[in-house]
Structures are given as structure tokens and as C-alpha cells.
Image (cartoon, rainbow, N blue to C red):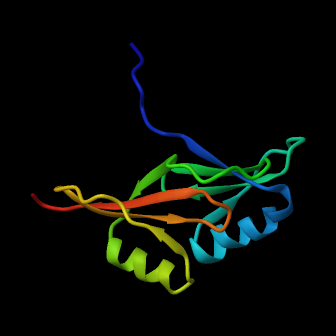
């Protein structure tokens, strides 16, 4: 058995030619704090999200899939308004009884779900 403690980081991929655009999107639009990334041979950026990290790396663009990461937020309506103000694309999620949620698609085809638990 594996006893997991917590998620440490999530990596998403961006086409190399759009890496700087991705850095700007994740700092200026999403509002993440960029942190130092070790000097790897590959290109990329790291960001802090609460107690985990988001790592951007590079690879050729792939078709959109349902693969995604989900983050709990404190105010789902405010998160949506914020992203709408930047014209971010949304992916509506099926309704679940104990949470309000939606996903957004970054300019590079990566899907991220945001959710807020509700009282049953």
C-alpha cells in the first residue's frame, strides 16, 4: 500500500514557441507567483499554487483532451468573474450535488477545473 501525503506539483506542457506567452498568462491572468526553477537543459517555468507547484515545460502541441487538474478555491463566482474579464475559454462541467465547479482552457489547450464545495 502507498500512503500518499499530498500533491507536490503538477506539470503541464506548452509549445516551445509560446512559452513566454504561457508565463505571462499564468502570472498576469491566473495570478500565480513565479518561483525559481533549477537550471535544467529543458525550457520552462515553475509557479507556486497554495502548498503545491505548477510546472510549465515544453512539448509539441497535442489535441485537446479531458485530462485536467482540479483546484479547490474559496470563491468560485469571483474566480469565474476574474477569468471572464480576460476572455478565458470555459468548459462547463456536469453538476454535482456537493460542489460548484467549472473548467477553463488556457491559451495552449490545457484544462484546469476550479471548484468550491457547498453545504449539502
- The residue positioned 55% from the left and 82% from the top of the image is 87
Image quadrant in which the C terminus is located:
bottom left
- Residue 95 x, y percent position in the rendering: 24, 60
Image quadrant in which the N terminus is located:
top left
- Residue 89 x, y percent position in the rendering: 53, 73
In this view of the protein, which residue sits in the foreground, 79 or 7? 79
- The residue positioned 30% from the left and 58% from the top of the image is 94
Count numbered badges in the picture.
0
In this view of the protein, which residue sits in the foreground, 114 or 63? 63
In the orientation shown, which residue stands out farthest toward the front? 63
In this view of the protein, which residue sits in the foreground, 5 or 102? 102
Depicted 68 relative to depicted 101: above or below = above
- Residue 72 x, y percent position in the rendering: 37, 57
Q: Would you identify the image quadrant in which residue 73 lies?
A: bottom left
Q: Would you identify the image quadrant in which residue 108 lies?
A: bottom right
In the orientation shown, which residue stands out farthest toward the left? 120
Depicted 104 relative to depicted 53: above or below = below
In the orientation shown, which residue stands out farthest toward the right? 41
In this view of the protein, which residue sits in the foreground, 18 or 63? 63
Depicted 2 relative to depicted 22: above or below = above
In the orientation shown, which residue stands out farthest toward the top? 1
- The residue positioned 86% from the left and 62% from the top of the image is 17
Depicted 36 relative to depicted 18: above or below = above
- Residue 111 x, y percent position in the rendering: 53, 57
Amino acid at each position: 500500500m502507498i500512503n500518499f501525503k499530498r500533491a507536490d506539483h503538477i506539470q503541464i506542457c506548452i509549445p516551445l514557441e509560446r512559452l513566454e506567452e504561457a508565463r505571462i498568462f499564468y502570472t498576469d491572468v491566473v495570478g500565480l507567483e513565479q518561483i525559481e526553477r533549477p537550471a535544467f537543459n529543458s525550457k520552462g517555468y515553475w509557479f507556486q499554487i497554495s502548498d503545491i507547484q505548477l510546472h510549465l515545460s515544453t512539448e509539441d502541441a497535442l489535441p485537446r483532451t479531458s485530462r485536467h487538474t482540479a483546484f479547490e478555491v474559496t470563491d468560485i463566482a469571483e474566480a469565474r468573474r476574474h477569468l471572464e474579464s480576460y476572455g478565458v475559454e470555459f468548459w462547463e462541467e456536469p453538476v454535482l450535488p456537493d460542489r460548484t465547479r467549472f473548467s477553463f482552457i488556457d491559451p495552449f489547450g490545457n484544462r484546469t477545473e476550479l471548484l468550491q464545495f457547498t453545504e449539502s
